[in-house]
Image (spheres, rainbow, N blue to C red):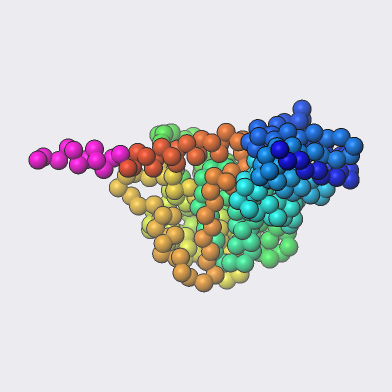
Amino acid sequence: MAERTIDIDRIENLVSVFGSFDENLHILESELGVRITDRDSALHIVGDEEPTAYAEQALTGLLSLASRGEPITTQNVRYALKLTLDGRSDRIAQLADDVVCITAKGKPIKAKTLGQRSYIEAIRNNTVTLAVGPAGTGKTYLAVACAVTAFRAKEVNRIILTRPAVEAGEKLGFLPGDLQNKVDPYLRPLYDALFDMLGAETYQNYLEKGNIEVAPLAYMRGRTLDDSFIILDEAQNTSREQMKMFLTRIGFGSKAVITGDVTQIDLPKDKISGLKEVVTVLRDIDDIEICSLTGEDVVRHALVQKIIEAYEKYEKGHSRDAVPAARRRRPG
């Protein structure tokens, strides 16, 4: 058995790291098979040599986050443990750096994973950024945060948000109302992010002035978008023609962010996803970066990450099983 000790400077940091009813502590103890106690202004970790060392590294990183005012959640703890087991515990503290945007309620928006951090840096350093990854990785939300920051800094004159109006496996039929009423259901996630960043009243004022535009992708045709921050969301549902049309709208002084999840394509089976194709077509072009977010970058409920992993495992096994089955059906 080994024992390691971490001295504690501020009790508030310890309370934050332990979490409600010590839930964060229980995660580390359960995953690593160690016992963690606090006494005499220090944390004491007891267990086998290697797990004890991992626990020390993870807790040191989490305490560093707490000392910078970062709230410690179960998601933080699981991600810090993952980084530690991968030999990257020294990067845990980086998650508290670099505020992307301040919301209307004064909440700082930061990257919560290293993948998100790379994504934000890619947006800042490139004219076109493609973010491909599963639900819950912050693709849309962080893109909107970067757009609002650029707009507030007067780097762009307007924000344009668009997505293809493709139904997710359901036929909604004819929707009542004018054009705005008809497209609102498709664009709701973009509205939600903008409301959070700007507040409903400020958003409405910018919308009326034309500084913010939210429209279906079909309405981008024939336009040249200068001095704009353009976000194409749900890009997996674009056709190859729509994707090419969108990319050729980009004008001088503009940035474009394209987000999508290639595992959730709602196009007819005979149509090729523009997002899947463009990742290959544009891979080697300067000033365009492709960011691949994974299940590790999911920042929703921990169960979402497990669901994504389960589907990935199932689909890999299913695709392997499909070949022998097809061969057996061939005539001898």
Which residue shows up at 85% across the image and 45% down it? 7
Percent from the top left, x then y, of residue 120? Answer: 63, 58
Percent from the top left, x then y, of residue 167? Answer: 44, 39
Percent from the top left, x then y, of residue 97? Answer: 74, 55
Instruction: Name the quadrant containing residue 27.
Output: top right
Horizontal placement of 155 versus 262: left or right?
A: right
Q: Residue furthest left?
A: 332
Q: Is residue 19 magenta?
A: no
Instruction: Name the quadrant containing residue 263.
Output: top left
Percent from the top left, x then y, of residue 40? Answer: 90, 37
In front of the other: 196 or 78: 78
Horizontal placement of 302 versus 24: left or right?
A: left
Q: Which residues are magenta?
A: 321-332
Horizontal placement of 234 versus 156: left or right?
A: left
Q: On screen, 127 above or below 307?
A: below
State the quadrant of the N terminus.
Answer: top right
Which residue shows up at 62% across the image and 42% down it? 299
Which residue shows up at 43% across the image and 39% down it? 313
Q: Main secondary structure of the magenta part?
A: helix
In front of the other: 190 or 97: 97
Q: In this view of the protein, can residue 167 be seen by the observer?
A: no
